Amino acid sequence: MTLAWQSVDFPGGKVSYTSEMSFISESSQTRVPCYRVLEDDGDLISDCDFQQVSKEDAVKMYSNMVTLQIMDNIFYEAQRQGRISFYLTSAGEEAISIASAAALSEQDIILPQYREPGVLLWRGFTLQEFADQCFGNKADYGKGRQMPIHYGSKKHNFFTISSPIATQLPQAAGIAYSLKMDNKKACVVSYIGDGGTSEGDFHAGLNFAAVMEAPVIFFCRNNGWAISTNVSEQFRSDGIVVKGRAYGIRSIRVDGNDALAVYSAVSAAREMAINEQRPILIEALTYRVGHHSTSDDSTKYRQLDEIVYWKKARNPVNRFRNWVQNIGWWSEQQETQLRNSVRKQLLEAIQVAEKTEKPPLSELFTDVYDHPPSNLEEQEKHLRETVTRHPKDYPSDISV
């Protein structure tokens, strides 16, 4: 017998009573479906619900995906040659950063994890700027103080990448709340990987955003692997999408290898976030084809045939190319010209970046204190003395 007619006003809202002792199931009988628009071969699914994209934007999306693909290959090779110290690729996940960026406004603020260079690429960050950051030279906006791939650009509303996982989520909630207080017609987008959802900051960020009704999109790239940890060893829930409901956040699961689906989902999420002043959680199912980084060998913990399958059969770049080519917006000639041009530009950018001198040592000690404390001045003195004593151990173009 239920007592649904009886209820009580608790501080959190009205709750009905029941005389039946019933525990909520740990999971639903069916998994949350994954929204997609394109088949694996690039054909449009009939009667699908998606946001129309213009020819200009579609061509730019595909061109950027190809550029990102080539950039990753060349910078990865540069690291293997010892020319830069570190790198990680977006292989297999190109559609996520490019398509989501295409659905946003330039005024929307980005808090990345570290696999979103495509967002910067879309917003106009040049290949030379990417190269300068990876080589840590004098032209790098971070003044050579960050690891390679830790990009940032105030001009493009792109917060500088930081290595600690998930710290950007509570920050995103706070920034979104500030946009709300200022009545801005913009939102915040914070990216995270599936591994980051195991961090406390993920839960704090979502709860904060929900309670404050902040216009922020939490975009989770569920690529199956948190370095060497498979998702099966990370959580027992139905992925990430179901976690949103626990915090009162509207959520959707999308095919991260389908550029049109990502574009459509982010377009709708942005509209809801801004017009309804609410957070949105997006889980994009994808696969990290590359190693986690140049410090990783993923063949040690996953099968090679699994990687090959996703690289060939589920490739997001090939999939989107088939679509733009099938509707007459792209050709083989354009493909050849684009790949040759991007490769040439990248190699030239790397040559310039390598020849550009390093930032002066003094930049290691600036931008934190108005007046450096005595212990920092002492550290700078010791560093200069060390470089002077052992010049062969340091780059020759360091200004002492």
Image (cartoon, rainbow, N blue to C red):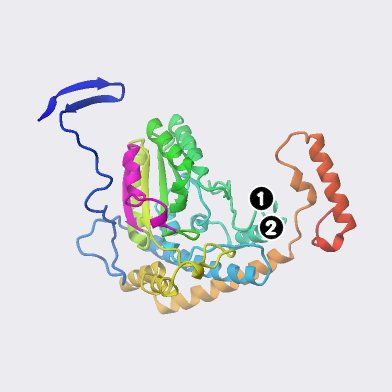
Q: Nearer the viewer, residue 231 or 41?
A: 231
Residue placed most toward the observer, 171 or 291 = 291
Q: Is residue 270 visible?
A: no
- Nearest the viewer among 315 and 200 is 200
**Residue behind mark 1:** 142
Mark sitting earlier along the chain (2/1): 2
Q: Is residue 243 magenta?
A: yes
Query: Which residue sits at x=41%, y=68%?
Result: 317
Residue drawn at (42%, 66%) of the image: 62
Write down the residue under mark 2. Answer: 136
Residue 237 magenta: yes
Q: Position of residue 336 (x, y in %)?
A: 48, 78
Where are the magenta residues, as a range? Answer: 230-255
Displayed quadrant of residue 357:
bottom right
Q: In the rendered view, does 376 fall on the left or right side of 195?
A: right
Residue 397 percent location from the top left of the image: 81, 60
- Residue 17 visible here: yes
Instruction: Please state which amino acid type lies under the numbered disc 1.
Output: Gly
> Is disc 2 in contact with disc 1, using a CB cutoff of under 8 Å?
yes
Secondary structure beneath label 1:
loop
Nearer to the camera, 61 or 262: 262
The residue lying at 53 percent from left, 76 percent from top is 340
Up-down relation of residue 233 to residue 55 (above or below): above
Is 270 above or below relative to 389? Answer: above
